[in-house]
Image: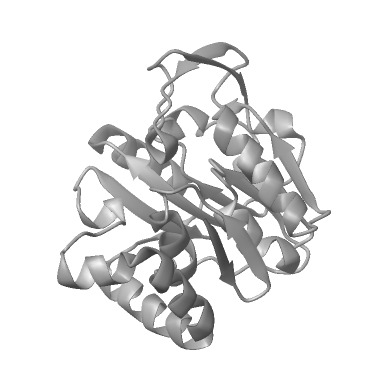
Amino acid sequence: MIFKYGNVKIEIPQGYEFVYYATFIVGEYDHIHVKKDDIVLDAGAFVGDFTLKIARKVKEVVAVEPLPWAFELLKKNVEANELKNVILINKALYDEDTTLTLSDEGVGSKLGEGNLTVNTITIDELGRNFTVVKMDIEGAEGKVMKGEWINSVREIAIELHGKENIERVTSYLVSHGFKLTEMKMNHLLINTFKNVLLHFPSFVDAERKSKVLYSAIFKKKYYVPALQREEIKIVYGRK
């Protein structure tokens, strides 16, 4: 299914339409304010929703996605949008170079589970001084909170999974000079109102195809996990 948002077009598999809404309409990462000289890490890029949204506004994006079929669609979406400043990495981020199993559950895929075998890489080994990081790596975020990469980061948005990870990662970020804000419902309502107004034709087209927002309002089917489960939070950090 093809969705649009301004000058961005993105193909998203059926059943994953909520990914478009979470990134482009609800704006769960809209607290990030990128600059033209930024080098951005999209950790857990999936099919490229966040990468496509910000790539034309920054110097470079390194998009890391371990799931093979999602990576192929990520590559296809980057090529379709003619983005020349995006580096694609088909590996999983971890605290060492190794080989791990991965479950094939789309946006819910987890390292250490399932039958897929993936190679891992550390953030430091990507060889960039990242200034902005978006991270959604389904529970592995605690493993990558080490190394020199954090020193150059100005802003970070991270989806945290599990009480232990939430406590560990937030403490780590605070100890490295970040001021943290947790995403709340009022943030999403403001973002949704703003994004619908700014890109109304794209929103109408997406809603006609998927009825995601209709389902959220009238059927109480919400698509941002951090609002439904206490063990998942989206946290923003700025230095």
Residue 111 appears in view: yes
Q: Residue at x 79, y 60 (%)?
A: 59
Give 111 or 218, whichever is nearer the viewer: 218
For residue 112, above or below residue 108:
above
Q: In the drawing, does residue 170 fall left or right of residue 81?
A: left
For residue 55, above or below residue 108:
below
Q: Residue at x 38, y 32 (%)?
A: 139
Where, by quadrant of the figure, is residue 74 drawn? top right
- Image coords of residue 160 (percent x, y): 36, 43
The furthest residue to the left:
219
- Image coords of residue 199 (percent x, y): 53, 82
Residue 28 appears in view: no
How many numbered discs? 0
Q: How is the image coloured?
A: one colour
- Image coords of residue 37 (percent x, y): 78, 64
- Image coords of residue 115 (percent x, y): 44, 13
Q: Residue at x 52, y 31 (%)?
A: 144
Q: In the drawing, does residue 39 fall left or right of residue 12?
A: right
Where, by quadrant of the figure, is residue 33 drawn? bottom right
The furthest residue to the right:
84
Q: Residue at x 67, y 51 (%)?
A: 77
Q: In the drawing, does residue 163 fall left or right of residue 183?
A: left
Give 151 or 41, whichever is nearer the viewer: 41
For residue 1, above or below residue 142:
below
Dividing the image into 4 quarters, which one contains the C terminus? bottom right
